[in-house]
Every structure is written in structure tokens, then in C-alpha cells.
Amino acid sequence: MKTLKIGIIGSGFIAKFLAVAMKQVRHCEISAIYKRGGADELADIARKNGLGDPKICDTVAEVCNHSDAVAIYSPNYTRLAIMEEIADAVQKGAKLTGVICEKPLGRTMAESRRMVELARGANLLTAYFENQLHMNAINNALVQLRPQQEAMGNFTLARSTEEHAGPHNSWFWDPSKQGGGVLSDMGCHSIAICRHILTPPGKSPTFLEPVAMQCDTSLLKWGQPKYREQLKERYGVDYSKTPAEDFATGIITFRNPETGQLVKGQFTDSWMYDKQGLRLSMDGLGPGYAMEVNTLISPLEIFIGDEAAAGAADAETALEKSTASRGLLAVQPNEAHLYGYVTETEDMVNSFLNGEDAMLDWEFGVEVTFMVQAAYMAAEQRKTIDLTDSGVKKELESYRSLISQGKGAEVLFS
């Protein structure tokens, strides 16, 4: 079987995490990496782990000319410009098969729709990387409960929480660059996974229709003077002037278009979870049955006492976003697999080699953008948004949240 040669644009945290996932997937290699900070380190990871001998490239076009597919893992504010360059490279003769984009596809509906337009105009297959929909813990539970769904009816409520102590890089904290705060960063995961759990077996990822959104955005930790100063010193971001939310919670209502039944997804996301590290918590409730996932429940625990803590390795070798290097620590032996990165990469590779879009294509990414932006609008207007209203839909097409415009004080300090 042919090997899919993947060029990577963006060599930060997510690129390295996905390289770890690629180690566990057949028929793919890293063929090229765009030259920017971290590129040499990523290339070294590839070579040491049998993922190819990637060429470090000075231009996006050069990456395209050495690849079958290109993965966009760069910061949110760079992605549309990069996609313009990819489309231009294809027009000039690059023989690309497909393009991958890590969530979110765009910071606004306008950006997301333009990304799709460019990909389809260049006749490229697409993969939207939303790892949580590929988590085996969730999908195995759904398969296990299919007989109950058939006998009793589908899930009626799904809940998803994603929390950690805050992002790694300065641009994540900058609402104008990232597209908002924790809702933009992690709410896209939580809203999408709620819809996935609620979707009846055998239906497409976009089967359920979003009909209503309510949401609250808050600045609970990182708006306090002590922590504002920490952000300013560490990342150069001033939350006294241009804040973003560090906590968001809401409810989205979906309708089954075949039966008319309404179901609900409840999502909560925060950058103020100062415990073991990243926590993903999902559950689904149906009539007479339920499922629950908590990624901090691990088959492996270690203990490091105060005396031994001086010799502790980097805390994140145990768990993503870990804030502790002593005490009783949960350790996930294979985080890339646990969080769905391995399965989403495998799906993309197999789909592209078979000439198909991935299970989650960029049109799916547009829908996620729509729901996230609706959540921001609901929080700003402090009311439930009717997502079936044609006027609301039209407004969302050109909408940009106040937080993403750097005007978060109007929403978060009032």
C-alpha cells in the first residue's frame, strides 16, 4: 500500500503531539516541514521515530511540492493566509491530494467558509482534525449501548467538560489572534462531542440540527490583579485592557430532523483547572442507560514525595498541562491514543489514500465554527439565540465577537 507523504506547516505543541500519534499509524510519513520555530526539533522527532527524513522548506509552496497532503497546525491567525498559499501552489502545479486543518477551521464564519472555498477550488480532499470525536473511550461506549438505544430510544442529554490551567503560548491568550478565549480554544471540542454523543447510530456527523444556543462567558481567575500580572510578564498579554474569557458554559439544543425530538448538549470549558492537568469529562444520558468518560482516571499512578521532587522530570511527561511534579499523580501511558489523535490520523490517512474526504471534512468544521460563534453571540446578548432564525444565521455569517475584537471588557467586566 502506498505511503501518504505529509507536509507540516506549524511546528509547535500540537504538531509534536500529532507526530507522537503518527508513530502508531501505518502508511504515512512526514515528508516536509515549513521552516519556523521548532521545525528542526520536529524533524528530529520524525527521524528518530521512523517517520521519514523530512525536508525543511523555506516556503509553503516548497512544502506542497514535497508532499501528498499538507497539515496546517500553525496558529489560528495564520491559517487562512497559509491556505491561500497552498491553493496557489496547486494552481501552479503542486500535486497535492488533500489538506488537513487542526481545529478550529476559522476564527469566524467568513474565515471558515473561505477555507472551504479554497480547498474545493483546488480540488483537494479535506480533513478537519477534531480529535475528541475519535476517542475510543467514547465510541466504544456508543457501540456498547446501541442495543439500548434501539430498545429505549436515543440519548437525550450529553455533557462535556474540558479544563486545564491555561495554554502554552502567548497567541492563545491573545483574543484577537486566537479568535476569543477558552470558548474558542476548547468549546469547539465540547460542543462537537456533545453533538456526536447525541447523534443516533448510523447517522452523519451533521445529522442533528442546532436550533438554540445559550451561553455565559466569564473571567474568573486570570482577571484578578495577581494573575493579570503573571500573564503580562509571561506572555505580554494585558487582560486589564484586552481580556478573554477563562470560563464558558452553555447549553445547545439539537433537533432530530426525522422525528422532531429535541435533545440537549451542555458544555463547560475553563483555563483555571489547577489540579493534575488536562481533564476531559463527558457523559451521555438516555432512557434507562448512561455512559461516562473521565480522562484523569488512569490505570497508572505514581507517587513522588517532597524529598524526591527535586529530581522529578518535566511534569508534562505524565500528563498534558500537568501543574504538579510531586504527590499522587495520574499518568496516561498513551495520551495520543486516549484523546483520539491516533484514530483521527489513521482515518485521515486511509481516507486520503482511498481518494475520500476524512470522516470529518471541512464542511463539518464550518458547522463547528457556526455553533461556537453562536455561543459568543448568546453570551454577548445574554439571551438564548434561535439558530433557526434566518436573520440570526445571516448575522452570524459576518459576526465577530467583541472579545475577539479586543473589546472583551465590555462583556466580561460589566
Image (cartoon, rainbow, N blue to C red):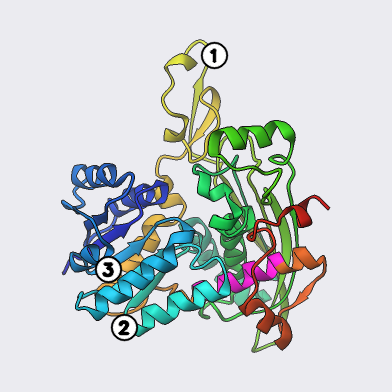
Residue type (three-letter) at the residue carrying disc 2: Asn
- Helix, strand or loop at mark 2: loop
Which tag, 2 or 3, sits closer to the chain's start? 3
* Residue denoted by label 3: 69
From the top left corner, tell me how far across and down residue 224 is, in percent.
Answer: 74, 37
* Separation (CA) of disc 2 from disc 3: 12 Å
Q: Which residues are magenta?
A: 365-376
Residue type (three-letter) at the residue carrying disc 1: Asp
* Separation (CA) of disc 2 from disc 1: 58 Å
Which tag, 3 or 1, sits closer to the chain's start? 3
From the top left corner, tell me how far across and down residue 97 is, in percent.
Answer: 26, 75
202 vs 261, left or right, is: left
- Helix, strand or loop at mark 1: loop
- Disc 2 vs disc 1: which is toward the camera? 2
- Count numbered badges in the picture: 3
Which tag, 2 or 1, sits closer to the chain's start? 2
* Separation (CA) of disc 3 from disc 1: 48 Å
The answer to whether the residues at label 2 and label 3 have Cβ atoms under 8 Å apart is: no
Picture disc at residue 172? none
* Residue denoted by label 1: 306
* Residue denoted by label 2: 123
Q: Is residue 409 above or below residue 237?
A: below
- Nearest to the observer: residue 414 or residue 351: 414
- Disc 3 vs disc 1: which is toward the camera? 3
Quadrant for residue 368, please give it: bottom right
Does the magenta stretch mainly form a helix, a strand or a loop?
A: helix
Residue type (three-letter) at the residue carrying disc 3: Ala
Neighbourhood count class around disc 3 (C-alpha, 10 Å): few under 14, some 14–19, many 20 upward: many
Can residue 33 be seen from the camera position used here? Answer: yes
Outermost residue on the front side: it is: 241
Can residue 260 be seen from the camera position used here? Answer: no
